[in-house]
Amino acid sequence: MNKILKNTLILTAITLIAGLGLGLVYEITKAPIAAAQETAKKEAWQQVFPEASLDDFEQVDVDQAAADKAIADMGVNATIDEACTVGDAGFIVTTTDKDGFGGSIQVTVGITADGTVNGVSILSISETAGLGMKATEPAFYGQYEGVQAEKFVVSKDGGDGEPIDALSGATITSRAVTGAVNAALGYYQNAFQ
């Protein structure tokens, strides 16, 4: 009985010390991580609207009713994460599609006032190297840019919308990125038009 009590106290002490250590590390790294995320967000804004200055960007609250309608209208498994106005030039919508091959894919989409996709920036992606990760290359996401469309579709799937050529060997990734861009377009159509 004495040995069980001794082992229990040792394990409790180890757990307590490890928990305090993790809490300390979290507190130390929380601010730098938040700053890095904020910097990445602003870099994405600048990438999708390179002609705008940082003073032109104004973050606005996401209209949840418009977000829900956009996701239902587009038929995607996504969320609308953030929205931003860019002066008179247009809007920025950050979305996450949950159906990527390696998990969720988060993109920032710049949409001009007339509904043209001005730019696409991928914030978070963890797809297969050499296949799905090619979605981060301009050769793929550039297909959306400069196009005024109600909706995009992966060309091999068919359907109504502006066709996008899928990445070879990464159709699921192509669908997820297209879904994220469509969610942004749907939000623009429901909240900003």
Image: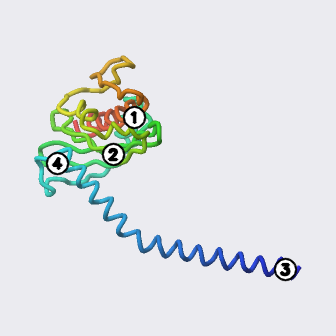
CA gap, disc 1 and disc 4: 33 Å
Q: Residues within 10 Å of mark 4 (few under 14, many from 20)?
A: many
Q: Is residue 60 left or right of residue 33?
A: left
At which x and y percent is residue 56? 14, 53
At which x and y percent is residue 106? 36, 44
Q: Which residue is mark 2?
A: 63
CA gap, disc 4 and disc 2: 17 Å
CA gap, disc 1 and disc 3: 55 Å
CA gap, disc 4 and disc 3: 67 Å
Q: Residue at x 38, y 37 (%)?
A: 130
Q: Nearer the viewer's eye, disc 3 or disc 2?
A: 3
At which x and y percent is residue 188? 26, 37
Mark on residue 131?
Answer: 1
Kind of residue sitting beneath label 3: Lys
Kind of residue sitting beneath label 2: Asp
Which comes before the other along the chain, label 1 or label 4? Answer: 4
Q: Nearer the viewer's eye, disc 4 or disc 2?
A: 4
The relative height of residue 74 versus residue 67 in the rendered view (above or below) is above
CB-based contact (under 8 Å), mark 4 and mark 2? no
Kind of residue sitting beneath label 4: Val
CB-based contact (under 8 Å), mark 4 and mark 3? no
CB-based contact (under 8 Å), mark 1 and mark 2? no
Q: Which residue is mark 4?
A: 86
Task: Specify the quadrant of the image occupied by residue 122.
Answer: top left
Q: Residues within 10 Å of mark 1 (few under 14, many from 20)?
A: some
Q: Residues within 10 Å of mark 2 (few under 14, many from 20)?
A: some
Mark on residue 3?
Answer: 3
> Helix, strand or loop at disc 4?
strand
CA gap, disc 3 and disc 2: 60 Å
The quarter of the picture where the N terminus appears is bottom right
Kind of residue sitting beneath label 1: Leu
